[in-house]
Image (cartoon, rainbow, N blue to C red):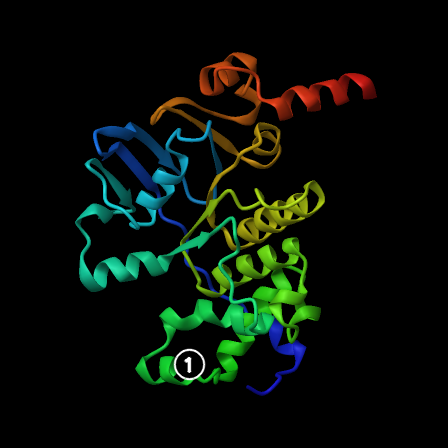
Amino acid sequence: MASPPASRAVVETDAAVSPVVVVGGATKVFRGTHALDGVSCTILPGQFVAIVGKSGAGKTTLLRCLACAITLTGGSIRFGEQDVGALRGRALRRHRARVGMIYQQFNLVKRLRVIDNVLVGRLAHLGRRGRWLALARHFDPREQAVALRCLDHVGLLDRVWQRTDTLSGGEQQRVAIAKILAQQPEVILADEPIASLDISNGTLVLDTLRRTASRAGLTVIATLHHIDVARRYADRIIGLRDGRVVFDGTPAQMNETAMLDIFGELPADYLTASVGRRAAS
């Protein structure tokens, strides 16, 4: 693949406007155990929603149901007017293409160059011939321009031609965000996107995700392990416990009573941050 000039990064990605997402009484049962137990919420376009809870609370299960990676046992999920539980075949594949999924372990091909990984996000937009050419790493200059624009969004335009395994963990997660932006999703789902990163890189990744999603007007639904991080970045926090919603409100409403309802105790990161705030004052 020829190296296009960086100036082509000015091409916009033209992401679609996020739909209203309505979860109605969502239930998922695994071997007699309710991973989700009547979860209901409405997520408006452009919101950054953090889903928090202890391990096993149902956070990842909810994301996987939103992505149609697994099907509900009961209830419904609607993206706009579309009941995604009714989708099959090509319609189901189209829905999965409109949902961008960011994983904890980046989900990149480490031996490929950065731009090649981002271009993987363009595959759903290519015809049959384009996909065959992509296997040989031949992409139309217009597709390359979109990839460059996405790398510019995440601040990695200077890493375009590097092998991905030469980047830091934080940089690799930002490449993963660029790949999802290249997909032109209507909603971004992120499953513990900073769990494997140190504090500095985690902050940079969430800053990038928040900024780029806001710039494109995209809804972001992210599971987060640290309550202080959720309070800092989210517009709205949904707390799950044993598959049920026990909190749904703003970061300002996330007080110690709410934390006890969600976690059964005050989270360690909240206690540490509280000590730091008291010491600073």
Q: Which residue is mark 1?
A: 135
Residue 144 or residue 18, whichever sits in front: 144
Q: Is residue 250 left or right of residue 60?
A: right
Q: Quadrant of the N terminus?
A: bottom right
Residue type for callout 1 = Leu
Task: Classify residue 154 by image quadrant.
Answer: bottom right
For this orientation, the residue located farthest to the front is 31
For this orientation, the residue located farthest to the right is 280
The residue positioned 82% from the left and 21% from the top of the image is: 280
Residue 136 or residue 182, whichever sits in front: 136
For this orientation, the residue located farthest to the top is 257
- Residue 70 is situated, as x and y percent measured from the top left of the image, at 27, 47
Instruction: Report if residue 192 is visible in the image.
Output: yes
- Residue 45 is situated, as x and y percent measured from the top left of the image, at 42, 44
The residue positioned 57% from the left and 17% from the top of the image is: 266
Q: Is residue 271 left or right of residue 143?
A: right
- Residue 68 is situated, as x and y percent measured from the top left of the image, at 29, 49
Q: Quadrant of the C terminus?
A: top right
For this orientation, the residue located farthest to the bottom is 2
- Residue 78 is situated, as x and y percent measured from the top left of the image, at 27, 43
The residue positioned 62% from the left and 66% from the top of the image is: 165
Looking at the image, how many numbered discs can be counted on the residues? 1
The residue positioned 48% from the left and 85% from the top of the image is: 138
Instruction: Report if residue 11 is visible in the image.
Output: no
Q: Badge 1: how crowded within 10 Å, few (<14), some, or many (20+)?
A: few
Picture layout, residue 189 above or below residue 226: below
Secondary structure type for disc 1: helix
Residue 140 or residue 272, whichever sits in front: 272
